[in-house]
Amino acid sequence: MSTQSIGQLLRVGWVVIIALFILTIIEFVAAIGLSGILQLAVLSILAVIKGTLIVQYFMHVGQIRKSITDLWWGILVPSEVEE
Amino acid sequence: MTAHVSNATNKLQELALNRFGLWLFLVSDVSFFVALLSSRFFVYGGATPEEINQYLGLGLTILLLLSSLTAYRAEVGAERNNRTMMNRNLLLTILMGTLFIVGVGFEWKIALSHEVTWPSKPYGTILFTLTGVHATHVVTGLIAFTVVFFKKRKADIGEGNSWAVEGAVKWWHLVDLAWVFIYPTLYLVNS
Amino acid sequence: MNGLLPIGKGLVFAAIGFILGAAISLGLTTLAGHPAGESLITLGYVGALIGWLMGVGMWRTWGAEWFGLPTVVHDNSGGWKRYFRFNTDHKVVGIQYLLTLLVVFLLAGALAVLMRIELATGAQDVFNKLGGITDYNTIMSLHGIMMIAVAVATLIGGFANYVLPLMIGARDVAFPRINGLSYWVVPPVAVLLLLTPIFGGFDTGWTAYPPLASKTATGALLFELAFLTFGVSSILGGLNFIATVVFLRAPGMTWGRVPVFVWSVLAAAVIALIATQWVAYGLLMIILERVIGMHFFNPVDGVGGNALLYEHIFWFYSHPAVYIMVLPAFGLLLEIMSTFARKPVFAYKWVVRAFFAIVGLSFIVWAHHLFTSGMGEWLHGPFMILTELISIPTGIVFLAAVSTIWRGKLRLKTPLLFAVAILLNFTIGGLTGIFLADIPTDIQLQDTYFVVAHFHYTIVGGEVFAIFAAIYYWFPKITGKMYNETLGKIHAVLMFLTFNLTFMTMFMPGSDGMNRRVSSYPDQLSDINGLVSIFGYLMALSFLPFLWNLVDSLIRGRKAPDNPWEAKTLEWQTSSPPEIENFETIPTVTGIPYGYGNPDIQHSKTNTNG
């Protein structure tokens, strides 16, 4: 986030929100048009996509990526070597 | 002098620490919502009563998504030292969040008027619990935004000085994220 | 006496908060046209809890900041007063937890003695004589939940709080104010639980299944609120430790140089962070059923829920919860074995992996508590296999422990005695768990005293013994005084013997089908139960040398050196007790903390120029 300009950041905001709106409309249509397991599967996938967009672009989950991978590797291979 | 004891060696580390801590709290809250959502199918199966107002549900969803945009813009404003953008969008978010609560109140009023959606009936149990717990998170978020608005209205902002805004906004995005999953679970599933 | 002012303020604000909450509840229920009933207690309690927290110091040191008001900075340098207010020093918080939980432990132990008096004969005669003040079921349920609280919180909230920041070379935990908060919700939990007899008690056991939990006396509501509150403490504590270990390790402390106790606390913290919400939801469902009349657990008009929903949700937390209890015990076990055998922890990397394998597996075995519940048969096989799998990483930890002391130069001090006892006890606990994991035997043994003996072997024999190991191990560090070693050894031997006598014998009526949670049983089991009771009284007596030692050493114990055990981890490289900021200068870590007998491996060096 720190490297992008204010214009870029605002544009990302608009792109993501449009995407979320479109996905929501698709959700609504799928709910009316489909039923059963297929409906459940489609709704689940759509929800996950929407959730990923929010977590990635609005919540900037990437900011903690380094801490998480550091911890993960530390558990798998607790190394003595200093960086 | 503040009583806050910080163990971070510098401001950058303090920010990273606060951010990580908030994420941990958000993850723990996600766990709570997963428990709630999973019980829906146990209690009421895969159907939704037709008494539920689908247009209200869609409207609430759109409203909350919009408020997430304004929250995002408020954070951008704070980080990039644009005070007007921050203040305006904080107020917009609070406004939309309040409208959302009013909408949920409306939803409850409708639910109380049909026997199948009473809280003492299975679907009503799930409806009131899910939306009630979610609404608690919304109200907490609104309180947080109000406190942050008054604190940061004229205070220093910019990169490294915007944690209060960033924290409240992340909480709001969690509220939106939870609704992304609550909405289809509560309204749309109709096997 | 103004040292008790924060407590006084807390109580006053709690009363005000209760009135406010009850008023809101009254308003809402009048609007809805319902009788107020238990919603008064629920909303009143929420108000009281907030008031209590604000009064004991959270407002003056934290809350006021949000509103731009000046806050108070306390002097943490000494005296008893700092323990009776909201405090952000992890060492103070650790001691607050330890002393509170010690009182809870002794009370719950006394309740157990009462239970054994009743259970000494098959007739239900003891509590009748008490004039109906309370009943067996409430005492049994209280014993359960109070001991669960002690088991979950002592090693983490008490010892890890005190020791972990020292062990990683930090000045405090990541979020000291949240740390203070996690402690101060605990006294209300204890108070609520002790008030339950006045409100009709609760006869559900600590597991509080519906439909009984939704219909029984108001004491059950107090229990639900208490357990919920305790969950908040657990979640916040877990959050704090994860952040602390990830961010605040001393320079040079790479992941491979982190002591195993720290790893074990990290693993337990992950479970506490993610699993606790599930029991919170289960408890919330019961509260909503009671207060609003919601229907989670029984079908209405042919549609609706099932009491099994509660069991699944409850055990989804409560099984991982036992690993919150036991993982720090394993970590401590390995630290003590290393220190007192003068050998490095064997297979350190595999131990770390095993801890987290346990964390992962612990989330997918919960339904072994539901084998006799009527859940779908297709779930039986998979959960049986998964439950058995968890013995593999546990076995790795145990093999590592045995290999650590193998051919070591043993220093037979009290902590090591407790550590060896843990190995023996938990082996029995684990082996008997196999009979419960395997469905054909579990069908017969579920809800019998076999289960009771099994979990006392694992939780008491494993974790409570670890708590005592921790007390003896870190007593010099925390108090700056040495305990009496002879008395310590006497306590260790007596406790080990009486504990095993009590609970080994208990397996027998269990496999004969004696029901748990009921105070009567068939007459032919009278003799053996009488024996278990006698052994139980002896076990209660075995705590006396410990209590004497504790008090006597606090008053006139010999001054302790900085490092009485000649251990390598960082908490021993500072004074006993440590100064307020823990270290004069933060040490730099240069090697693993287990370089016994190897002068080339130095865990740390102190920078003399800051």
Image: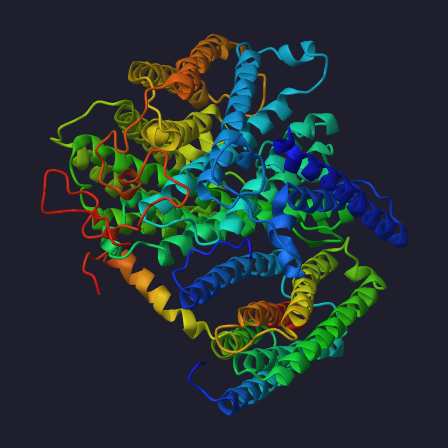
Q: Residue C160 appears at what percent x and percent y?
A: 40, 41
Left or right of B179? Residue B5 is: left
Which of the pair C69/C23 is nearer the observer? C69
Q: Residue C373 appears at what percent x and percent y?
A: 54, 40
Please report the residue visible at 24 percent of the width from the left and 43 percent of the height from the top: C396
Q: In this view, does C547 lie above or below C325?
A: above
Q: In which quarter of the image is residue B88?
A: bottom right
Please state, as top left, top right, bottom left or bottom right, where the C terminus of chain C lies in the image. Answer: bottom left
Q: In this view, does B51 lie above or below C183?
A: below
Q: In this view, does A78 lie above or below C157?
A: below
Q: Can residue B47 be seen from the camera position used here?
A: no
Please report the residue visible at 73 percent of the width from the left and 42 percent of the height from the top: C13
Please state, as top left, top right, bottom left or bottom right, where the N terminus of chain C lies in the image. Answer: top right
Q: Is residue C401 above or below residue B85?
A: above
Q: Quadrant of residue C190?
A: top right
Q: Can residue C580 be seen from the camera position used here?
A: yes
Q: Quadrant of residue C578?
A: top left
In the rendered view, how is the structure colored?
Answer: rainbow
Q: Residue C331 appears at what percent x and percent y?
A: 31, 40
Left or right of C67? Residue C317 is: left
